[in-house]
Amino acid sequence: MAVSYMTEEGYNKILAEINYLETVKRPEISAQIAEARDKGDLSENAEYDAAKDAQGIMEAKLAQLKQLLSNARLIDESQVKTDVVQILNKVKIRNTKSDAVMTYTLVSDSEANLKEGKISVNTPIAQGLMGKKAGDKVDIHVPSGIMSFEIMDISI
């Protein structure tokens, strides 16, 4: 698995989710399995099957999160510069066709959240912006075609 770069905040969020799954969800699911098992014949027990499925899904998610953290490299936010677009930069861009202005923060895959304006550095738009300077105009290939943007500002 590839190295995953993330902020300390993102790392701590995943750590908290792992803790929740281990200390809250795992015991809840174990209790559901035990309760369903006490009801008798397991071959026709839908509650037991559902609880076992939930356990499998939860354990898979837990393993995935632990794997993500094992390959995580924290980004020293004090070293982030704004001379060119890079991870953790907040980039204000203007669509040159529609004049729509958008601001995105470029983050790791695990921290991406479009509602918060955080896009993964691996998205086509972020890839097209990486290494560019304020004032640059860029044409970016996206699934729907080519979009043209002007980089208006780069900040932290």
Image (cartoon, rainbow, N blue to C red):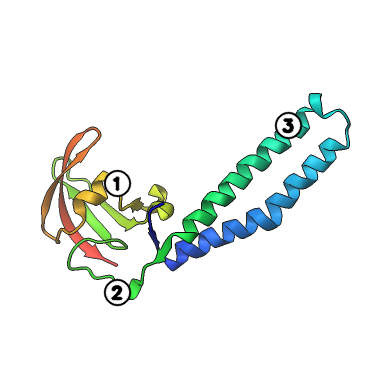
- Quadrant of residue 56 in the image? top right
Query: SS class of the residue under badge 3?
Result: helix
> Horizontal and vertical percent for residue 35?
84, 40
Query: SS class of the residue under badge 1?
Result: loop
Q: CA distance from mark 1 to mark 3?
A: 38 Å
Looking at numbered disc 2 in the image, what kind of residue is underneath it? Gln
Image position of 118 with respect to 11: above or below: above
User: Would residue 98 be found to the left or right of residue 116 on screen?
Assistant: left
Give the residue displayed 32% in from the left and 57% down from the top. 105
Residue that badge 1 annotates: 123
Residue that badge 2 annotates: 79
- Quadrant of residue 37 in the image? top right
> Horizontal and vertical percent for residue 151?
16, 55
Give the residue displayed 48% in from the left and 60% down from the top. 70
Looking at numbered disc 1 in the image, what kind of residue is underneath it? Thr
Question: Which of marks 3 and 1 precedes in the sequence?
Answer: 3
Q: Residue furthest bottom?
A: 78
Looking at numbered disc 3 in the image, what kind of residue is underneath it? Asp
**Label 1 crowd (10 A; few <14 / some 14-19 / many >=20):** few
User: Would residue 136 be found to the left or right of residue 69 on screen?
Assistant: left
Residue that badge 3 annotates: 49
